[in-house]
Image (tube, rainbow, N blue to C red):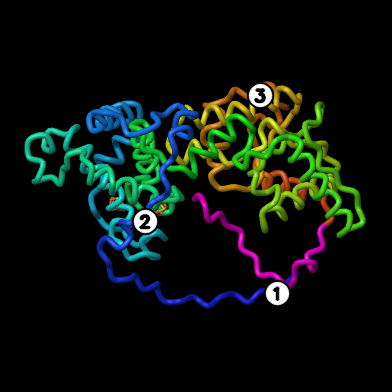
Amino acid sequence: MAEFETPALRPYPEIPPIEIGVMAHSKPFYAKEDHQQKIGFPGELIDNWQQAAVDKMGELVDNSRALRVFLDSCVKCGACTDKCHYYIGTSDPKNMPVARQDLFRSVYRRYYTLAGKYFPSLVGARDMDQSVLDEWYSYFHQCSQCRRCSVYCPYGIDTAEISMAAREIMDSIGVGQKYCNEIIGKAQTIGNNLGLPEPALADTLEGLEEDIEDETGVTVRMPLDEKGADILLVTPSADFFAEPHVDGLIGYAKVFHQAGLSWTLSSHASEAANFGMFIGSYDNMQKLALRVREAALELGVKRIVFGECGHAWRVAYNFLNTLAGPFDFLDPNYPLPQHVCEVTYDLIQRNALRLDPSANDDMVLTFHDSCNV
Ligand code: SF4
Ligand code: SF4
């Protein structure tokens, strides 16, 4: 067993003094007209956008009891204020989770509460106007939707859900961000965020097979679109080439190989990271989730396994069954998508893997998910 030096407990981190507005300028590139339209949103800011945004907010609050509770129940206890990495890293008080929520809550109060309608200044209610939209665009894109803050909130208020709602409203009036919206379009048409078509994917996997053989002398396959395989592996497309993600995919292939499991990747569903969740769009989330179902049916697999990715896994375990289920065609022993760590843990318990702990003695490892709590 490797010996680890346990890190010493340090005093509480020092919370930086606030620097008001220091991150107001920070915002992503706006999505272009065709990025927007491809995924069902207006190409540019629509006429009468203020009213449309308020109406959309009402629709979201009506459809989600959780969102309404989050907006109505904050007691400003402050427990979340120093829990967001965006605040700790920038000192901008609008990056405190409670302040981020209030960007949304202030508009909700104005239009959807009695006090906000009649005494707006007494309850911090604000009209939906250009300055609010500018603040939303900056600060709701400075939230990675990790949900760390919600763990510390005594009411379980989930800022990530509020960020998702704000992004959905902005998209619905024609103000989207390029990074997510462009790649959602690619994933919906090509199958992955990178826009890697099937021949490029096949070539990449062949190269990885050669790398493994050079390293280990063992022929380990990375099958693509193989009908009749037992397992469909859906993994983030970053795993196909980026460092260190590719080491994850290589590891999955080695695990499946050693355990003698039959598996395949799919070119139709070659993306686990569902960016529909980032923009709070359940329609787009569903379109991407359905590709996983279609691939599983087309290939006739018995199990679906997700590779590592915090947000991908959140969609897989929280939403996939609702969006694309029921998965009643899978092996009843594995009726829902599994995480690759669950599969590996199970194999270790059953002694189906031979492991050499000394091989990683030079590393200090932690097991956590930085993207999603
Ligand atoms: S969800 Fe994460 S990134 Fe967003 S406000 Fe909370 S801690 Fe910050
Ligand atoms: S911890 Fe919860 S209740 Fe307290 S200020 Fe933050 S969001 Fe509001």
Residue depicted at 57% across the width and 57% down the height: 368
Please tell me the numbered disc located at residue 277. Answer: none
Please tell me the numbered disc located at residue 3. Answer: 1
Whether the residue under disc 1 has CB within 8 Å of ligand 1: no
Q: Say what amino acid the circle numbered 1 marks.
A: Glu
- Nearer to us in this view, 2 or 47: 47
- Nearer to us in this view, 272 or 44: 44
Q: Which residue does the numbered mark 2 point to in the structure image?
A: 26
Verify whether residue 356 appears in magenta. yes
User: Where on the picture, by quarter, is residue 329?
Assistant: top right
Precedes in sequence: disc 2 or disc 1: 1
Question: What is the C-alpha distance between the residues marked 1 and 3?
Answer: 46 Å
User: Where on the picture, by quarter, is residue 205?
Assistant: top right
Question: In the image, 214: left or right of 306?
Answer: right
Question: In the image, 274: left or right of 77?
Answer: right
Mark 3 Cα within 10 Å, few/some/many (few <14, many 20+)?
A: some
Question: What is the C-alpha distance between the residues marked 3 and 2?
Answer: 39 Å
- Quick check: 262 above or below 244? above
Front: mark 1 or 3: 3
Residue depicted at 24% across the width and 45% down the height: 132
Q: Main secondary structure of the magenta part?
A: loop
Question: In the image, 162: left or right of 364?
Answer: left
Question: Residue 211 at what x, y percent from top left?
Answer: 83, 55
Question: Residue 262 at what x, y percent from top left?
Answer: 82, 36
Q: Say what amino acid the circle numbered 2 marks.
A: Ser
Q: Say what amino acid the circle numbered 3 marks.
A: Glu
User: Where on the picture, by quarter, is residue 165?
Assistant: top left
Question: Do callouts 3 and 2 mark residues in contact (Cβ within 8 Å)?
Answer: no
